[in-house]
Image (cartoon, helix red, strand yellow):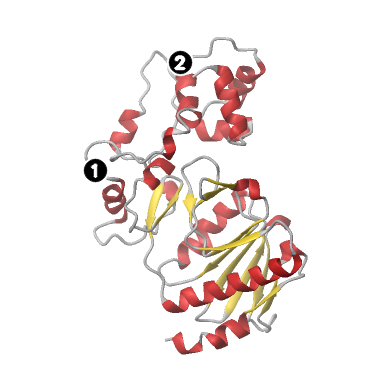
Amino acid sequence: MTIKAMKERKIEMGLSNRELAEMSGVPLGTLQKLFSGKTKAPRRDTVQALTRILGNYEDRKKLPADVSGNRSPSEHCMSKAGPSGKDPVKPAAEYTAPAEAGAAGCLLGENAPVYRTRSYTLRDYLALPEEQRAELIDGVFYNMAAPTTLHQLIVSMIQKSLLDHVLETGGPCLPFAAPVDVVLDKDLDTVVQPDVLVVCDRGKLRDGRIYGAPDLVIEVLSPSTRKKDIGLKLYKYYEAGVREYWTVDPQNRQIAVFDLEHEGAISLYGTEEKAGLKVPVKIWNEACSVDFQRIFSFAEPLFE
């Protein structure tokens, strides 16, 4: 892959030099010299590391028969999650790429720099069977159980509230409900399916999925996803540039609103401090509110 092609692909993917350095492991100074023209003949290791991120971008959309060896991505996922196939509970950072993936990414050469390798990417995610729901976070697969009727009813009513506002007031923002793929970091190793999301930059909608951070993300908590939603995914949404994040706790009738655009200020609704359950949408300057008292009351027959 030529330097010119890498530069064009970097722009196409919307990456800064710093973001590309973090993704590939190539030092920022090396990238700056390369793309400014100061470096005319980059090391082979550098080209290979950048090509793993930037090269064959179109090929990543194709569905491979399997990943390395004869094991499918879903089989790798099950081995990571344990015998039961349940969600891993350790942070993604504690997981490492499979041995075969590391071997495939090895670079041989005298005093060659060590660039980190990824375990799974968007390509592997797209290769999963259609009936298997999963999220990919930092190269690690997390299985997703089928949602309950209570969960789905709450999700659909939240989306309807947001959609009604958009239809009434207009504007570019689009509300979606799961399942919708969000390639969160543009680095192809994190693909999530938020329960509800709002995207105001329609340029992020490509190939039937969303590339980049939504403006608003809402997750409805369940016992199997609680840890991930209030821990790992909160961090990922913040780092990716999500402006506002809500977690909805149906069992305790509480909603937590994280104003990620303004240093992560937290507002808790359904508590003594904020007893009301009408939650305003900050990205719309509170011109719209979601009435969770109405939602919970309507869904009452489905509560256990």
Q: Residue at x 56, y 26 (%)?
A: 27
Locate residue 289, reporting x and y percent.
70, 74
Secondary structure state at the residue bearing disc 1: loop
Residue placed most toward the observer, 161 or 289: 161
| Residue extending farthest top | 40
2 left or right, relative to 112: right
Residue kind at label 1, given as amino acid type: Arg
Tell me if residue 95 can be seen: no
When asked about the image quadrant of residue 98, the answer is: top left
Secondary structure state at the residue bearing disc 2: helix
Residue placed most toward the observer, 182 or 138: 182
When asked about the image quadrant of residue 160, the answer is: bottom right
Locate residue 156, reporting x and y percent.
53, 73
Q: Residues within 10 Å of mark 1 (few under 14, many from 20)?
A: few
Residue kind at label 2, given as amino acid type: Arg
Seen in the picture, residue 257 relative to 173 is either above or below; the reply is below
- Residue of label 1: 71
Q: Residues within 10 Å of mark 2 (few under 14, many from 20)?
A: few
Q: Residue at x 46, y 43 (%)?
A: 189
Seen in the picture, residue 38 relative to 176 is either above or below; the reply is above
Closer to the observer: label 2 or label 1? 1
Tell me if residue 269 can be seen: yes
Locate residue 243, reporting x and y percent.
67, 56
The residues tagged by marks 2 and 1 sit, at their Cα atoms, a distance apart of 30 Å
85 left or right, relative to 18: left
Seen in the picture, residue 71 relative to 143 is either above or below; the reply is above
207 left or right, relative to 119: right
- Residue of label 2: 44
Q: Residue at x 46, y 89 (%)?
A: 301
User: Which tag, 2 or 1, sits closer to the chain's start?
Assistant: 2
